[in-house]
Amino acid sequence: MSLEKLIKQCKKQDIKAQEELYRMYSGKLFGLCLKYSSSYQQAEDNLQDGFMSIFGKISQYKNKGSFEGWMKRIMINTSLQKYRKERFFEIINEDQLEEDNKVEIDTDEITLDTLLEHIQELPVRYRQVFNLYVMDGYSHREISEMLDISTGTSKSNLARARNILKEKIEKRTSKTSAQFL
């Protein structure tokens, strides 16, 4: 069944079409949920809640733009929803911000799995901003609106996430180098 037809059937609340849509996209969207969740179980819950939201809002999709992008936005918002009510973000002044320093990674020394593991270990507030900015390409303005924080807080949390990752990577690579001596 084509994606257009599948969407039409889902708009009619066709359970078989919903199951097929779930099978088509659950793997990819689960990976997205993992980035914004603190545990595997929480990611599973967010995936289920996200699909419920997708099926509830599918009539709002007007076949403009990427359907997958539309679903990703819903999954991210679903995953972040529980954090909006709680204040995980540290509020700071603009003058406390460090420069936006990039972390250079030697891919010969660290695997993608290790890097993802380090990202998953970040505190919730830092992980969310890092993923939204670095992995998903949102601007600090968009992040501030999504998380109900200031752009300065978004920038600060990104800088702190990068510093934590840099320290973890340096620590890991120095341990690895020491093992070979």
Image (cartoon, rainbow, N blue to C red):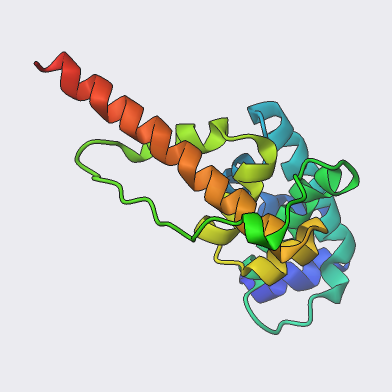
Quadrant in which the N terminus appears? bottom right
In the depicted structure, whether residue 64 falls above or below residue 72? below
| Image side of residue 136 versus residue 50, left or right | left
| Image side of residue 8 versus residue 34, left or right | right
Residue found at the far left of this picture = 181
Figure label count: 0
The front one of 7 and 101 is 101
The front one of 108 and 75 is 108
Question: How far from the left and from the top, in percent, is residue 144?
Answer: 74, 63
Q: Residue at x 62, y 53 (%)?
A: 156
Question: How far from the left and from the top, in percent, is residue 39?
Answer: 66, 28
Q: Quadrant of residue 3?
A: bottom right
Q: Residue at x 73, y 32 (%)?
A: 42
The front one of 52 and 6 is 52
In the depicted structure, whether residue 180 falls above or below residue 51? above
Question: How far from the left and from the top, in percent, is residue 80?
Answer: 77, 49
The front one of 46 and 113 is 113
Q: Residue at x 63, y 49 (%)?
A: 157
